[in-house]
């Protein structure tokens, strides 16, 4: 994450402060006018503080907009109405005799800016949207009917458009707020077939016929507190019936146009036609376990080894199910030495994330880390590693994210880095890799997002 992203992350924190202060100043102006009360100094202080806070919020918001994850048109409306509110607040501060008129305009523009901000965050129509309580499977074209030995009538159907009729409405209702042309969190859009198949900055999200390997589905089943759970905590969640529709669609090939035979649909209709229109929690748990098949193959980490590492102040966190996946962080280690890596070797198959930044890490240590075969995330920022050490990492066949910020690596590492085809995100900010080296890496790793400290204005969406 570069400095522009860091600054941008403060916008949601800062934005509510000026709104409250400036609106409070407006209310005090009205109160002073009606009640003939003397509040001039208090109003001046509120307008000044609110305007300054709004200025900082605008700056942070501008940096946040550079991510390109938001629709440019709405962002511009939000941006300029927010700037207008800031300027009007300052004008009202200096021109006391016209405060009522100026602050009234300020309150109006501030309300409009807040509305556009809400649209960016929650999607169009967020004020009056209603959540549906259940989802049926798609209506089908009837070809013939038949009756079995019981009195139950079943309809044999030939074709249906599952994606268009049922999957797309679910995505629109629960996912478009963050993943559409208006907002592209994680460089991911779910509002068209092209974008769904493309995936986001973390790679593909849909593997046709295999729900357990499709993050579009598996992320729905993660614990609510998990950072990868979708939708995020606090957002409207999918019902069990909606999750079942997505599971069924992916398992049957994730067709955006195809036909589905009747006999494969009828059992699912029966499942979803109970009193609550939801599948049982046991079925969901089973599907969740299918999504973690890789973890099942490894054993739980040795508890004695974990206790030893914790006593050394190494931070150990569990990820996923069954307490098998570990995230290891050396943030609390003040005096790093090679013995710390040796102590990790006994649980290396369980380590999926490793963060050793700002430490005296050397190329020798990378020779040890290369045996961590399940490692997916590796943070080595601001360490003493060199190009020779990077060559050790080519053996990490599951590595998806690599942070080399502030290291001494140069263009000599390009061949080694480009051989790690599993990389989805690569951080190279403040390294010695040249611009031409970055371009070479982009060509060799076309599916890898390479962060090197640059940021640009978002381009118009030509496919909108």
Image: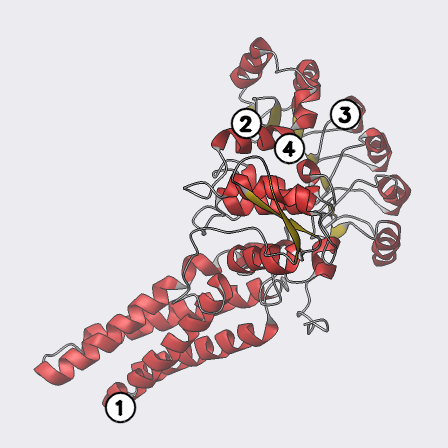
User: Disc 3 or disc 4, which is closer to the eye?
Assistant: 4
Per the image, the residue denoted by label 4 is: 291
Q: Which mark is residue 373?
A: 3
Question: Could you classify mark 2 by the number of other residues whose Cα lies within 10 Å: few (under 14), some (14-19), or many (20 or more)?
Answer: few
Question: Can you tell which of label 4 and label 2 is closer to the viewer?
Answer: 4
Disc 1, SS:
helix
Residue beneath label 1, please? 98
Assign a secondary structure to mark 4. loop
Q: Is residue 381 left or right of residue 307?
A: right
Q: Position of residue 148 (x, y in %)?
A: 59, 38
* Nearer the camera: disc 3 or disc 1: 3
Q: Can you tell which of label 4 and label 1 is closer to the viewer?
A: 4
Q: Which residue is mark 2?
A: 317
- Measured in 3D between alpha carbons, the distance from the residue under mark 4 to the one under mark 1, in whole angstroms, is 63 Å
Q: How many circles with numbers are drawn on the protein? A: 4
Residue 430 in picture, x, y percent from top left: 72, 50
In the rendered structure, are the residues bearing label 4 and label 2 in contact, judged by CB atoms less than 8 Å apart?
no
Q: Is residue 438 left or right of residue 188?
A: right
Q: Does residue 253 show up?
A: yes
- Quadrant in which the C terminus is drawn: bottom right
> Which of label 2 and label 1 is nearer to you?
2
Is 404 above or below relative to 366? Answer: below
Residue 452 shows in this picture: no
Q: Are marks 3 and 4 in contact (CB under 8 Å)?
A: no
**Of residues 390 and 243, which is closer to you in this image?**
243
- Mark 4 → mark 2, Cα distance in angstroms: 20 Å
| Quadrant in the picture for residue 413 | top right
Of the numbered discs 2 and 1, the one sitting upstream in the chain is 1
The residue depicted at 71 percent of the width and 34 percent of the height is 376
Left or right of residue 400, residue 126 in this image: left
Label whose residue precedes the other's in the sequence (3 or 2): 2
Residue 347, given in percent of the width and then of the height, sits at: 66, 17
């Amino acid at each position: 994450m570069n400095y522009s992203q860091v600054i941008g992350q403060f916008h949601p924190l800062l934005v509510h402060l000026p709104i409250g202060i400036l609106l409070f100043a407006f209310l005090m102006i009205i109160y002073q006018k009606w009640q003939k009360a003397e509040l001039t100094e208090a109003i001046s202080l509120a307008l000044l503080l609110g305007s300054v806070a709004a200025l900082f919020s605008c700056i942070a918001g501008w940096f946040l907009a550079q991510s390109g994850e938001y629709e440019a048109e709405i962002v511009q409306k939000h941006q300029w109405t927010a700037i207008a509110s800031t300027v009007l607040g300052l004008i009202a501060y200096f021109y006391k005799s016209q405060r009522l008129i100026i602050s009234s305009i300020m309150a109006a523009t501030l309300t409009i800016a807040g509305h556009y901000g809400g649209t960016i965050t929650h999607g169009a129509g967020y004020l009056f949207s209603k959540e549906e309580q259940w989802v049926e499977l798609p209506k089908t074209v009837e070809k013939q009917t038949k009756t079995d030995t019981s009195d139950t009538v079943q309809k044999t159907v030939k074709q249906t458009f599952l994606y268009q009729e049922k999957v797309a409405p679910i995505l629109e209702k629960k996912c478009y707020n963050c993943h559409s042309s208006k907002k592209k969190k994680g460089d991911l859009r779910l509002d068209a077939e092209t974008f769904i198949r493309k995936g986001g900055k973390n790679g593909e999200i849909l593997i046709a016929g295999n729900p357990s390997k499709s993050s579009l589905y598996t992320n729905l089943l993660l614990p609510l507190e998990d950072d990868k759970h979708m939708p995020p905590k606090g957002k409207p969640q999918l019902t069990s019936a909606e999750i079942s529709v997505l599971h069924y669609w992916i398992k049957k090939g994730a067709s955006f146009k195809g036909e589905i035979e009747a006999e494969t649909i009828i059992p699912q209709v029966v499942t979803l036609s109970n009193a609550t229109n939801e599948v049982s929690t046991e079925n969901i748990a089973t599907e969740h376990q299918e999504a973690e098949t890789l973890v099942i193959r490894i054993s739980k980490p040795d508890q004695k080894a974990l206790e030893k590492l914790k006593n050394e102040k190494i931070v150990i966190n569990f990820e996923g199910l069954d307490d098998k996946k570990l995230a290891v962080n050396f943030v609390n280690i003040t005096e790093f030495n090679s013995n710390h890596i040796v102590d990790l070797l006994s649980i290396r198959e369980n380590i999926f994330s490793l963060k050793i930044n700002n430490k005296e890490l050397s190329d020798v240590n990378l020779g040890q880390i290369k045996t961590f075969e399940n490692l997916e995330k590796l943070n080595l920022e601001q360490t003493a590693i060199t190009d020779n050490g990077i060559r050790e990492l080519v053996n990490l066949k599951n590595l998806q994210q690599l942070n080399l910020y502030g290291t001494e690596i140069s263009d000599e590492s390009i061949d080694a880095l480009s051989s790690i085809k599993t990389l989805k995100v690569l951080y190279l900010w403040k390294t010695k890799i040249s611009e031409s080296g970055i371009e070479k890496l982009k060509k060799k790793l076309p599916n890898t997002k390479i962060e090197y400290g640059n940021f640009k204005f978002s381009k118009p969406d030509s496919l909108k």
